[in-house]
Image: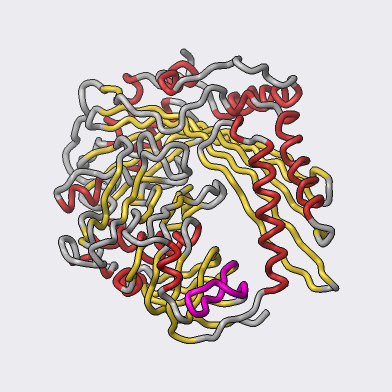
Amino acid sequence: MKLITRRSFLRSGTAAAIAVAAAPMIPSGCLRFSGKSTAGYFESEFGISDALSRKVLTRALSRGGDFADLFFEHTISNWLNLEDGKVNQAYSNIALGVGIRTVKGDQVGYGFTQELTEEAMLSAASIAATIADSSQTEPAGQFVSLELENYYPLTTLLTSVPLESKLPIIQSTNEKCFSLSPLVEKVNVGFHDQQKRVLVVTSEGQKAEDLLPRNYLYASVVVNKDGKRERAGWNLGGRKEFSFYTKDVVDEVARESVNRALILFDAVQPPAGEIPVVLGPGVPAILLHEAIGHGMEADFNRKELSTYCTMIGKQVAEPFVTIIDDGTNPALPGSLNVDDEGTPGQKTVLVENGILKSYMHDKISARYYNVQPTGNGRRQSYEHFIQPRMRNTYMLEGPSKPEEVIESVESGIYVENVSNGQVKIGEGDFSFYVSQGKIIENGKLTAPIKDINIMGNGPKMLKNITMVADDLQMSRGGGGACGKGGQGVPVGFGMPTVLVKSMTVGGVKS
């Protein structure tokens, strides 16, 4: 097949997108898709043959190098937004290109191109090759396609869903929000969907293709009571089928958004200082992700920037604490059939019964530590280099009941939702804004709280977890992305109810 240029592809892609938007709703049962039909997509559509991949890899290794890889990407993203009862944004974006990496020790040479032509790819490979300065090494003689599990199977491609099928979802969400309370003054609703195809080819002879869906429905509401305004929002999504967005999902997004805003009218500020903090199940696990998870990413430990760099095999928490990073959870935002450097999706035990067992590795750190990669090599797009990144990070259930955890606290706070966090990875110090929660008095939940920050140190917080309940929940949102090194990737997180015996609680001005 003749190689396609980016310009000609985008021209034809735009025409196809217009045609899809104007098409009637696809009948149920059409355009059936299975994960296995990803194989051969880049060859059939863009002429990326094994012979061409080998030629580009040979150029990437022309000055030596431990290994090299190619990351091909074709992503179609759509956004639809409604504000003040009207659709004020509807747009799409197409990303097409290849990133080429050459690795020598822990050094990386990287080049990328939007043109999937032989000339452009060889030029990018020459740039990546400059990281090394020795005799040429050769890629594998043939490539073996990996057999992968599919943790987010689709029956219908998201690109086959027309605009007319998405409009009723955001319109219904908007109407539902206004119907729930006369105090609702303003509603913003959005729907985002993305279909990302990738092909990874490595100089070690591995080849893997994947199709990653991502989508979410969100609502943000402003409520007004006697001139006092409050705002809150909610979203649901992940690596879902379009059929996930039922009336029940619409109702839940609207109800949670409105209720979370209304309760803030009654919120107060709790006493400041060092007090016990109960982290509720689900969303508060963003603290686990930010304050603890990043410190267990292998690059920070290889560079001795993390508190955990000398802690493998040592106790970092109580024996009832086990923490997992997992790419195999069905349809969650951080799930991966294969990571961005060709390692199949898997589950990694970070902390087991209080003992630090593993870091999260890409191929570079795995070679440094003489262990196997854990499937945590991730990048935002073909324009970005690989980093060890979290997938779905969560704490397993413990021996207590959630009500027992709350009843054990004489005076403290209960955290339901956090946002706007800041973390210093090396020291593990963090600060998070609590957007939803309650005061705990004499073992009972009382008044709602707002406008406070919780501060602490991640490793210290982990050691200070004294109770873990049996009510593990994963966050069900799909809109969150983790930032690191200037890149954002979708992640998931979860936890049961836990008690941290002491954290710093401080108020903020309204």
Q: Position of residue 315 (x, y in %)?
A: 19, 66
Asked if one can make out residue 53 in the rendered structure from this viewpoint, the answer is: yes
Q: Quadrant of the C terminus?
A: bottom right
Q: Is residue 70 left or right of residue 285?
A: left
| Residue 427 at least partly seen | no
How far from the left and from the top, in percent, is residue 470? 38, 56
Please check the rendered image and state whether residue 438 is part of the magenta-colored stretch, yes or no.
yes
Q: Quadrant of residue 351?
A: bottom left
- Residue plotted at (44% across, 82% down): 275
Query: With respect to residue 321, does 307 lie above or below?
Result: below
Q: Which residue range is magenta in the image?
A: 436-450
The foreground one among 198 and 327 is 327
Vertical placement of 408 versus 102: above or below?
Answer: below
Q: Tell me if residue 453 comes above or below residue 492 in the rendering.
A: below
Which residue is located at x 72 percent, y 29 percent?
A: 165
Considering depth in this image, is 330 or 163 the residue closer to the camera? 330
Closer to us: 311 or 98: 311
Colour scheme employed for the rendering of this structure: secondary structure
Q: Main secondary structure of the magenta part?
A: strand
Among the 4 quarters of the image, the one containing residue 5 = top right
Residue sitting at x 43%, y 45%: 334
**Hey, which residue is sitting farthest top in the picture?**
1
Residue 245: give x, y in percent of width and height: 63, 36
State the residue in front, 263 or 392: 263
Give the number of marks.
Answer: 0
User: Would you say 166 lies left or right of 105 here?
Assistant: right
Q: List x then y, in percent, for residue 292.
A: 35, 64
Quarter holding residue 207 = top left
Q: Is residue 51 magenta?
A: no
